[in-house]
Structure formats: structure tokens, C-alpha cells
Image (cartoon, rainbow, N blue to C red):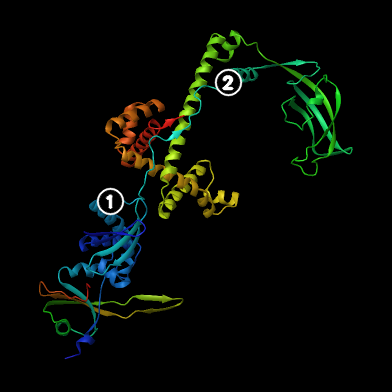
Amino acid sequence: MRNPHEVLVKPIVTEKSSGMMAEGKYTFKVDKAANKIEIKHAVEAIFKVDVTDVKTMNMPGKLKRQGKTQGMTSEWKKAIVTLKSGQTLPIFDE
Amino acid sequence: MKVNAEKLEGNKAKLTIEVPTETFEKSMDKAFRQVVRKISIPGFRKGKAPRHVVERMYGREILLEDAINDAVPEAFSQALDEIGSAYECIVYPKYEIVSSEKGQGLVFTAVYDLKPEIKLGEYKGMELEKLSEAAEEGAVEKQLKAMQERFARLEKTEGPAVLGDVCTIDFLGKVDDIPFEGGAGQDHPLELGSGSFIPGFEEQLVGAKVGDEVAVSVTFPEDYRATELAGKAAVFDVTVKEIQHKILSEMDDEFAKDVSEFETLEELKKDLEEKLSKEAKEKAQADLENKAVEKAVEEANPELPESMLAMRQDQLLENFARQIRRQGIELEQYMELTGMKLEDIRENFKERAQKELQTELVLEAVAQAEGVVIGDEDLEEEYKRLADQTGRPVEEIKKIYGGNKTMVDSLKFNLMMNKAIKVLTDNAKIK
């Protein structure tokens, strides 16, 4: 099994994601190569909670321009993890 | 809310106030709502970040100051209500935060000067001198004369001019045969004997006729405002162009009709007399009241805490600024014009502030000692008086005051002052 800290890159805190926290859904940026099962295990291992569902999506990179050169930012994978109802991840609030 | 009150040396009070966590959290929330508007955090639209995110990013401190400013004055006034009138606070207290730890509410102290204790002297039976209530002798005649002057007609004559005539003159002044600056004028109206020119000038025109050229030699007074001319002898070449003789009306019923609404001179005289004696009476009364208050203050000689004085000085300064602003001058401009610093102006108000405060304190103490209370009927009466004075219906006056507690309070305070003054004068030995 891969190191869970390599699977989860960082938490995502935005208006949309903070709204979903109320429903027990937490959002992470995860390794591009990670699959749902790995993500589930990683969250359970690090935060000692039970994960009931994982949704993932690939986020496209954005076109960035600097003067006449142009390039793309990296693509990345976003995962929305649903916890067993009643459980929370304290690192997100406080 | 827990309040612990103690008295300190130098007539000061110290309150230690604990604001419970829930109450303080409300203030924190209020502060947050203010602060969050100006904060943008990645991932959130401006003003939409939740409180814990803001606190995580900027720390709790950015809310604390605003929250404390919000919570402290309110808690303080509540605390004052709780502990009662012995700790009445009349100046701005000095706050100090003891603790504002998370989840523990807010603990702070407020230190302020208490109202000084007034030791009234002998405020009853003070010996006071009262000015004469009678009008000055000859005052009526003086007034009539002034009216006569005011309503005099001017009539052209050929001269010779006498004192009191208004001459139109051209003049050219020379010192040592050389004309000097400001020494020439054309078609200048000059009332002989009015003293508007250099002493000796006007008298020398007496007897002149229209068209006459008179050489007037005068010496400038030593204290003349143009220093290079002071004390020098000068000759003025004066051409008299016109002489108007002042004709005073006869003092008779006709005159009375012209200058007033009365039919006869007798009536006018009587009216003047009444007015003057009323004036004198009012003046005597006002003077008596002033003396009474002054003496009572002197007897008690209350010591004022610095903070009280400073606050009153600030108020006076504010009033002053408002007053000159109404005349179109900002305080900054005023400071520039007079070259005074803000501190200087403030210092100028010190004496007045002290006098006002002492007067108020002493009168209040007198009122208290005499058990003077201002009831509703006193207020009613005052409203009526104000209505008469301003010519508005009583209801309107009441409406203006009715909704405003501060205004009513200050009105009551004034009434109490007046009653206290009355106590002083009523009990005084008047000489």
C-alpha cells in the first residue's frame, strides 16, 4: 500500500467545499494516480474515521500566459470524501 | 456579569467587570461581520469567508480589538446600573483589559474619578449687595436725546458751519509742505464735533462757509497709529463743498408720534421709564444671582479632578469649533489665522470650564441639601415658557423634547440650577 500522506496532497477549503462540510463531505487534492480505494484507506488511516463514499474527478490544468509565452498549469485530481454520518475532520474547522 | 467595585485613594473608583463568554462572543461576532467585509481569502468571495477560516488565517487578534471596543462601554454602563449611584461616573473612565482569553469571556477594569464631595459653606444668610433697582436718573432724557439725534433731519445751508453740522470736504494734508500718504480725501462727509478726525481738526472748520478754503494746522497726537506721523505738525488744505445743518425736531407730541407708536410725549416718556426700570430691575436681579452663586462657590471651593476639567474643556472646545464653523471657519483655519495651537485654545477654556463645573457642582449640592426635586409640573411649566418665548404651540415643544431623554435631562438640570439659585437668593441677607 502507498504511503497515505503521498495520496492526500492537501485539503481544499473554498466556499463550495465549506458548504459541503456540513453534510460530512470533505474535499482533498489527491495524487493524480490514486484511485478511490487508495483514497478511502488513506483518509481512514490518517484521520481515524470511517469513509462511506469517495467521488473523484480530474481537474484540467488552466492556460496561463506570461507575455508571449504560454503554458498550462498541471492537471490534478480532486476527491470528495463522505464520512460516516456524525463524524468530522477537525483539521478543517479549528 | 460579575462586577467588583472598590474605591481608590484620591476619590477614584475602580470597577472590575467580567463579561460572560456568551455576551462577549456576540461582540466578537459583531466585530467579525465588520472585519470580514474587507478580507479576501483564496477560495472565497470577498466577505464570504467563515469566521473560523478568517481566525485561522489572521489570528483571533484582528477581531479582539473591535470586539472589546464594542463590549466594554456597554458592559460598563450595565455595571454602573447594577452597583448604584454611589459610583456615579461623570467622566470617561480609563479601561484596562485584564484578560480576553478564548472561551473565558472578557475581564477588564475601569478606573475613573468620582464626583467630588461638596462641602457646602454657609449658603444660607449670605450677605449680598443688591444693585439699585431704580433706573438711573436722567436715563429717560438721555434716551429721548438719542432718539432726537437719530431722527434729525439734515438741511443744506451756506454756513457758517457750527458744531454738529455735516460738511462735505476735500482735503490734502502736508507735513513740511510735502503731501503724505493717506492724507488726502475728496467729498468726505465729516460731522463736526464727532471726533472722527485728529483732535483740533474739526473745530477749525467751525465758521467756514460753502466754497471756503481753510488751512487747518494740527499736530498729530504722539500715539498716532501711523508712527512716522506721530507728533508731527501738519497743514491740511480743506475745501468746504457743502454744509448740512442738523435740525433736531422739537420735543413734543408730534415728535413722539414720529418716532414711536405713542400719541403724546407723555406716553412715550412713561413707556421709556417703564422699560428702563424693568431693565434695571432685571439687571439688579441677575447681578444678585451672580453674586450669590459666586459666593456660594467660593465658600464651598470644590476641588475638581483633572479628568472632569479635561472633559469639560473638550466639550467647550467642540462647541467653539461648531460655532465658528457656522460662520464658515474651520478650526484648522482658525488656528492658522490666530497662530494658536489646539492646546492653546484648549488651555484658554480652562478657567471657564473650572468655573462652570464648580458652579454646577455647588448648585447641585445646594439643591440636594434643600431637597429640590424637579417634577413633571415643573417641566410642564418650562415647556409653556419655552412655547411663549419661541411663539410655537406647547405641543410642538413637547414633541421636540419628549422623545429625547438627554434633552429632557439637561432641561431638568437647568431647572434644578435655577431653583438652587433661588434658594440662595431667597435666604440671603440683602443689603
* Left or right position of B366 against A69: left
* Crowd band around label 1 with a 10 angstrom C-alpha radius: few (<14), some (14–19), many (20+): few
Q: Position of residue B23 (x, y in %)?
A: 22, 59
- At numbered mark 1, what does the secondary structure look like: helix, strand or loop? helix
- Tell me the quarter of the picture where residue A88 sits: bottom left
- Give the residue displayed 37% in from the left and 43% down from the top: B120
Look at the image and tell me in which quarter the N terminus of chain B lies. bottom left
Q: Chain of mark 1?
A: B
In this rendered view, identify the residue nearer to me: B423 or B19: B423
* Left or right position of B267 against B148: left
Specify the label residue B139 is tagged with.
Answer: 2
Q: Which residue occupies the extreme bottom position in the image?
A: A1
Q: Position of residue B183 (x, y in %)?
A: 80, 36
**Mark 2 or mark 1, which is nearer the start of the sequence?**
1
| Callout 1 amino acid | Ala
Is residue B102 something one can see in this rendering? yes
Number of marks in the image? 2
- Give the residue displayed 10% in from the left and 72% down from the top: A86
* Residue, disc 1: B86
- Tell me the quarter of the picture where residue B227 sits: top right
Q: Position of residue A50 (x, y in %)?
A: 11, 79
| Callout 2 amino acid | Ala
In this rendered view, identify the residue nearer to me: A7 or B198: B198
Q: Position of residue B398 (x, y in %)?
A: 32, 32
- At numbered mark 2, what does the secondary structure look like: helix, strand or loop? helix
- Give the residue displayed 86% in from the left and 26% down from the top: B214
* Left or right position of B251 against B114: right
